[in-house]
Amino acid sequence: MKVLVFLILLTFSPPLTGNSKLDADTAYTGLMKRHRDLQKSGDLFNDYLMLSQAAGQYEADGKLCNLAGTHNALGNLFEQLDETDLALKNFLKAEALYAKCGDSISTTKIKLNIANCYFKQGERQKAKEILLPLEREAISRQDTDYHASVLFSLLRSFMSDNDIRSYFSYVDTLKMLPLSNPKLNYKRNTHLGFCQYLKKNYAASIALYREAMLEAKRDHDPAEANCILGLIYNFTATRQYDSATVYWSKYHLFKDSVENVAYASQIKQMESLNTIKNYEAQLKQEQEKMALLQQIIVLTVILILLSIAVVIIILRNKKQKAHIEKELEDAKNRELTALLNNERLQNRARKMEIENQSRRLCLNLMILEEKANALKSVRQQISDANVNGKIPPEIAQTIDNQIKYHLQDTSNWNAFKESFEKIRPDFFQKLKSEFPKLSEHELRFCAYACSGLDSKQIAFILNIQIESIRKIRQRLRKKLGLDPAESLEEFLRNFSADTPPAGNTATAPD
């Protein structure tokens, strides 16, 4: 339930930082005060929630120094819960952040916390490698209380390594410090008392231990037990067994009371630690779910974008294909139009050529007919001269026979028919096939009409009257099944609209 409430608060709570640097500093000061109050009350879980929320907010806002201080507080919290790994992780983060924001004092001082974590992890040499240079730092020498804390950690390391010489040397340095903090003072007296004990200056050692015990008792510090043990060791060494027995009784009473308090505190710390771990597990699970959800969303968006891209590509390809097909179709249409135009021009040219040939043919036919009429006139004149005796009969007969040969009825027609069939092949064959009742005389008339001769010209060629021509036309229209509005000449020209053989041109008869 607490985790759920925190997640809700984390989501909807306003930023911790204000609109100005002053507001941000005030908020950070209030945060640290609240942190100390929660530490005193033992409410470690809410302290953790508050610091975690603040760290997230400071990181989002880019407040590096405040973020470093928050990680330092989290490190102290985890160190109190004996979670050395988490404490060290937060201290190292704080060190890097302090260095990044240019706070050299805090960057140096936090090394003590890092060294203490290494010591608790059993890496004593690593801890001493940090503490020895740190003790010589100018910052340590300028801050007496901090210098004392560094010396306490060093003395603990020397004691664990049984390095008595170094221990005595740094105790002398500790002895010279002007401490104003009572807690640091009785811790120093404890070390001084132990040093006197090792040197067998028992009276001085007892005095120092008693002073330290009184100060620790006033602060209700568990370090009182170490002072009592120091007195017991001194009384035993000086064979003051009665005093040693009295202090043994005090030690057991104090130890029982302290153990009860420590047990209750330990239980409370374990509960807080378990709550924090459960919260972190749930938070991690929620973060994993959120990350998975984000991945799903990203993949979905990518799939949608890919689908859209594929659709766009397909549509574009389809459009391009349609455009290409349209261009091909247009090209085909243009080509077809060009072919049709070319064919139309060729047909027009053929038609004009046929018409020209027909006109030349008709002209030649008219010339032939005029020549024939002229010959007939000459024949008549020769006949008259023969009757009048102007020409000898033998000569007149010879000339008459020659003119008669050239005036045969079919001579001009045969020449015309031969030339006409070169212009309009299969005209007579098709006409006879479609209209078998047509006579030879009517077929001849159809050829003359198709060639463009008018009624007077046809009457002149056939040597008949205009009235006969009209009758022939009426008879033909009836046999051909023409409507009154239809033109006989147009019908015959369309009927004979066949392409002449290549290179075949009509030759006019001489």
Image (tube, rainbow, N blue to C red):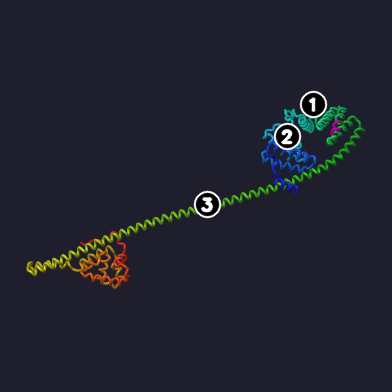
Whole-number angstrom distance, CA of label 2 to CA of label 1: 24 Å
Q: Are marks 2 and 1 in contact (CB under 8 Å)?
A: no
- Highlighted magenta segment, given as a residue range: 211-216
Q: Residue 105 appears at what percent x and percent y? A: 71, 31
Instruction: Return the residue at label 1.
Output: 176
Between 487 and 223, the one nearer to me in the picture: 487
Q: How many marks?
A: 3
Q: Residues within 10 Å of mark 2 (few under 14, many from 20)?
A: some
For residue 452, say whether it is visible: yes
Q: Tag 2, which secondary structure?
A: helix
Whole-number angstrom distance, CA of label 2 to CA of label 3: 60 Å
User: Which amino acid type corresponds to the residue marked 2 in the rendered image?
Assistant: Ile
Depicted 97 relative to depicted 467: above or below = above
Outermost residue, right direction? 242
Q: Tag 1, which secondary structure?
A: loop
User: Which amino acid type corresponds to the residue marked 1 in the rendered image?
Assistant: Met
Instruction: Return the residue at label 3.
Output: 313
Type of secondary structure dominating the magenta stretch: helix
Q: Residue 324 appears at what percent x and percent y? A: 46, 53
Q: Is residue 423 magenta?
A: no
Could you say which quadrant of the image residue 89 lies in?
A: top right
Instruction: Return the residue at label 2.
Output: 110
Left or right side of 350 for 326: right
Could you say which quadrant of the image residue 247 lies in?
A: top right
Whole-number angstrom distance, CA of label 3 to CA of label 1: 84 Å
Q: Residue visible at 26% across and 64% down?
A: 452
Between 15 and 392, the one nearer to me in the picture: 15
User: Which amino acid type corresponds to the residue marked 3 in the rendered image?
Assistant: Ile
Query: For residue 501, which numbered disc appears in the image?
Result: none
Which badge, 2 or 1, comes first in the chain's sequence?
2
Left or right side of 292 for 146: right
Q: Is residue 213 magenta?
A: yes
